Every structure is written in structure tokens, then in C-alpha cells.
Amino acid sequence: MPRTHARAAIRARTMTSQTLWMMFLTLGAMLVGVAAYAQEGKIIRSHGYSFYGDLKYPADYSHFDYVNPDAPKGGEISISTLGTFDSMNPYSRKGRGGALSTTMYESLLGEGVGGETAPADVYGEGYCLLCESLEYPESKDWVIFHMRKDATFSTGDPVTAHDIVFSHNLLLDQGLKSYGDAVRKRIPKVEALDDYTVKFYFTPGISRRSLIEQVGGVPAWSKKWFDETGARLDESRLMTSPGSGPYMIDTVDVNRRIVYKRNPDYWGADLPFNVGRNNFDTIRVEYFGDENSAFEAFKAGEYTFRAEGSSKQWASAYDFPKVDAGYVVKEEIADGSPPAPSGIVFNLGREVLQDKRVREAVALGFNFEWTNESLQYGLFKPRASYIQDTPLMASGRPQGMELALLEKLGDVVPAEMLTEDAVVPHSSDPSRLLDRRNLRRAMKLLDDAGWAVGTDGKRYDASGKPLRLTFLLNSSGSPTLSAIMENFMSNLTNMGIDAVLEKVDSSQYTARERDRDYDLIYGNYPAFLGTGTGLAQFFGSEAASYSLFNPAGLASPMVDAIIEVSLAAQTRDEEHASLIALDRALRHEFIMIPTWYNDSFWTAYYDQYEHPETQPAYALGYLDFWWYNADKAAALRAAGALR
């Protein structure tokens, strides 16, 4: 329409029609807003987050209950690790990342040094660190984080919403494929509303579980640094981007040691979140080729804190003079977390192991009772559950809400799961390695599975293919673990299986573990006390063929269905019933041979460290909230116990 005609048409309209039109537009906008509000519900603004909205610590908390708010700052804690490293970028599949190489980076919702939970006395709660508050609707369709304007990287550059957007997208584009595939489906959009406000949008129609925790836990990287250097997240490199955390890299000596030092200009030192935490001036990590050399170095004082993992060492090796003199403290500390579901993991990608009868037969070759008494000094307990010794552990037959849940899932749940007790490990004769009763059971299972015994005593299928299984083991690991697996493989040989224990160095082990190049491996899955989208990454079918988080390659319609029900739970009772069902289902699927667990931390350290009298349930925290006593350290040096 020509401009002159348009002006004439406008002038021809009366004021009344213009007013009515504006009222209509305004009312329409109001109705749209009301509809959106009705769908989303009220807006919640908080200093922290939990799915049910309940937080232990109020907005004006001064520090976490378990820390010593007056803990002195200073000193060094030194620890050991085994193997090698050739990269300080732990987010890439390439290379072997250095120990604690994520520790420089913070997230919107904070965590402890080394990735431990913070606060360590609650489960499923996150508190603002890089953010000062977050807001979200009751529907949890999105979340907005309001960031602290004083947060800076170690370079002095501010941490902004643009860095958060960049970091989130970098993980999607250059991080692990299984992570990117899962997150893209759930979090379609992120934007910086301004320099210090970032908004994440969540996909309609999916569970809101773990979404806010997911985006709140993304490490904050410097967009400026990546732009200037051209570095990639999927490359192996020793060069590191600056972090915003309390520690920064001091020195890196490849395959020998890494030293982290406290940032003297750390922006968040006085936050309530950090009071009584991050107490050491330096954290030193010493590398060793094997367990024996690492232990001898501890005795010599080359490093000063040891989280002991060997039952043999714990039971028999701490009788050296420094322990007798009180220079080294040997202490057991209760562990309130469910033990990691560790054990001998089956690679379900191998055709031979897809037959559950074969897996059950192989499991019968593991004698926990003999192993514990003969090689582990009777210090361990047999593990059955993925959430051992918690109220969520499945026991007996399914009942109540759990039974109703399983029945509702229909045919994906095997009928026997509804009527039989939860799967528990077999028992064995502790007096002899080869339990003949279990051997007979295993032989029958293998016969039934079509693996007949040939004239040479070996097992073959109908085509003449031998039953061969290879166990991949890290040669730099515990000698006790090596001895246990050698005996386990001996029992498999007695079944007629061509069982090979393949020991490789750390770098080969890492590469083959990532490529899932094994039949059997000693590994673990995470324990769970709450539901979340992480369950699908670890136990779900979506990325089962390649996910590093799912070493068995489990792809079970039943497990998938239970996870979906769990993600949709609206009450704690529903959530708990679904997790009990998940534990029962995972045990039924039999993806690993459960081995053992310890309900305490075994610690040994030179008597210059102190920790809170009341230990929090979910973390040992020696790098996080322990502290250094300078007077005790001086006494050790004066006595010649430390250099």
C-alpha cells in the first residue's frame, strides 16, 4: 500500500477503533502470560537446588556443619597414584589425564576438591558457587542462574555468562559422544541474557530429573583462552586453560609429579561455601610404577597421606618404626556412602557372553570366601547390591509399591522377578579355592549353553570354536588384585575355559578400556541414592554400544523402562520404589560378578594433619576440609621423620 493511501486509511479510523484494537492486543498478551504462568507455576528463587525443594542450609548459612571454620591455612598434603600420564586435559579420550586435573575448575553449583560432593553431609543438594542465586518455575522448564560479578579466573578475567554458554557447548561439540548425545536431547538451548545471567531451556515432555544439577555442574572454562590459543577439548595436551577455583597448577613433571598451589588471589575464599575448606597451600601428587614402590616411598616420607586400598598392606605392612613411634597415624574412618558397585564386569558386546548361562557359570569360578580369608585377611564383606547397606537395597521378593511398579511394566519384566528373591551372590567353601559343588553347577550351565567338553578337556561349541575368555588387567595395579584374578582364572581353566589373564601397562590399559577391548575387566558402576538422567548414561540402552560410563554395554528394555518410571516419580516414596526395582533388575541382568566392599576408609598419614571430629557421611575429604598443623609438622621434622 502506498504511504499516502495508508495515512489516509489511518486518519479514517476513529479513536474508538484504535483504542479497542490496543485493548485487544493488551488483553491477548495478558492471556498468553496467564496461560504460561498457569503452565509453569510460580517462580522459585533460591541459593541452592534440590529436586524436591528442601535444602538443609538456609540462605544465610555461615559454613557447612562438618567443617572447622577456624581451620588454619597452610602447609602441603602429598599423595600418590600409580601409572603414567601424558596430558593435563582429562576431558579427552586421547591421552591419559593427570591426577586431579579437573580441580582448577568451578561450576555454578559447587563441589569439593577432586570432585567430591559438597556439602558432604547431604545427598542430592547443590549450593551456589559461581552463581549467587538461581530461579526456575515449578514446572522446571528452564533455569536462570544469576552469577557473582566478582568471580574471576586465575588470570584476573571475569567469569561471565558467556563463558558458561561456551563451556556447555564445548562439552557437547568436543566432549564425549555419549555425553553430547544425551544432553542435546534434554537441553536444546542455552543463552546469556546478559554478562552475568545465563538461561538454560529444557526439552518439553521429558523428566526434569537431573537437568538443573546437570547444567549447574558444567565446569566453567575461559572462552577468551580457548579463542586465543585455538585449543580443543578433544585433544591431549599439557597446556591448561585457567580455572576460577582455589587451586592452580604449579608444576608438571610428566610421569613423576604434579603440584597444585593455592591461588593467593582466589576470588571465593571468604564465601560461606568455602569457609573451613581448601586449607592446604599445596597439593602434591607423586607417580609410581607399581604399588610396592609407592608404599616404600610413603614409609620414607616422600609423600605424606595414603588412602589404603590393599587389604594385605593394611593388615600386615603398617608395622614399620614410624607407626610404632606415632609419627604415622593409621586410622579407619566410617564411610557413610554406599560402596561403589565394583566387580568383574562382562563385556556384553562379546557374543559368547550374551548367554546369561555362560556368565552365571563364569561367576561360579569366583570364590569370595576363600579369597577374603586367604588373600584379604578377612577384612571385606561380600557385595550383592548396587546400593549396598541402604534402605534402597532390594531384598526378598518385590512387595508393595515396587511390586505394583514392576507389574505395571508388563512383559519387559521376566515373570520370575516377580516371584523370586533378589539375586544374591553364591557362597563358596572358604577352605579351598575350587569349590566342587559350584564347579558342578558351572559345568552343567556350560553344557546347557552348548559348550561341550572335548577330548582335551577344553570346551567347544558345535562348530568347534573354543570357549576363550581374556581378562584385561592393569599391570601397575594392586598385587593382591592380580593374585585374586590369577586364582579366579585358574578356576575357569578347571571348567574347560581357555582363560587368559592379560596384563598390560597403564597406557595400553586406558586405551583398551576406552575401546572396550576386553572380555572381562575389573571395573565399577556408580552407586545411586537418588534418580537422575545419569542412570540412563550408566545403565541405559541409548549409548550402550560405545559409552565409557557403561563398561558392560548393558542394553536392557526392562532397565530402560524402570529408569523412565524413576525419572517420572513425583514423590520420594515413588522414587525409592523405583530405585529398589532398579537394583533388583540390575542384579537380575547379571552384568558383573559382585566381589567385595569395605564400609570404612583406611587412611595412613604423617601426624601433621587433622580433620573434623564429626566426619560427614558422603566424603572422606582429606583434600577438601582437612588441615595442616604446623607445630606437629615441625616436630616430625625435628625427629627426623620427615625431611
Image: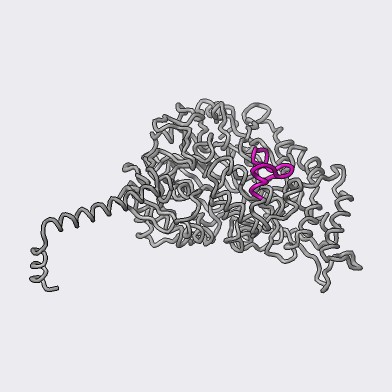
Q: Residue 395 magenta-drawn? A: yes
Which image quadrant for residue 202?
A: bottom left
The N terminus is located in which quarter? bottom left
Residue 236 horizontal/vertical position (percent): 50, 60
- Number of labels in the image equals 0
Which residue is at 82% across, 74% downward?
463
Residue 636 appears in which quarter of the rendering?
Answer: top right
Q: Is residue 452 left or right of residue 292?
A: right
- Quadrant where the C terminus lies? top right
Decide which of 426, 520 is in the foreground and name it.
Answer: 426
Residue 436 painted magenta? no
Most common secondary structure along the magenta stretch: loop
Which residue is nearer to you in this view: 466 or 591?
591
- Counting from the top left corner in percent of width and height, residue 533 is at 53, 52
Q: Is residue 390 above or below residue 408?
A: above
In this rendering, the answer to whether 270 lies above or below 423 is: above
Q: Note whether residue 346 is visible.
A: yes
Residue extending farthest right:
455
Q: Nearer the viewer, residue 200 or 17?
A: 17
Position in image of residue 416 (x %, y %) = 75, 52
Q: Residue at x 84, y 42 (%)?
A: 430
**Residues drawn in magenta:** 384-406
Q: Mark yes or no: residue 293 visible.
A: no
Q: Is residue 157 left or right of residue 91?
A: left
Q: Position of residue 152 (x, y in %)?
A: 35, 45
Determine which quarter of the picture holds residue 329.
top right
Q: How is the image coloured?
A: one colour
Residue at position x 43%, y 41% in the image: 246
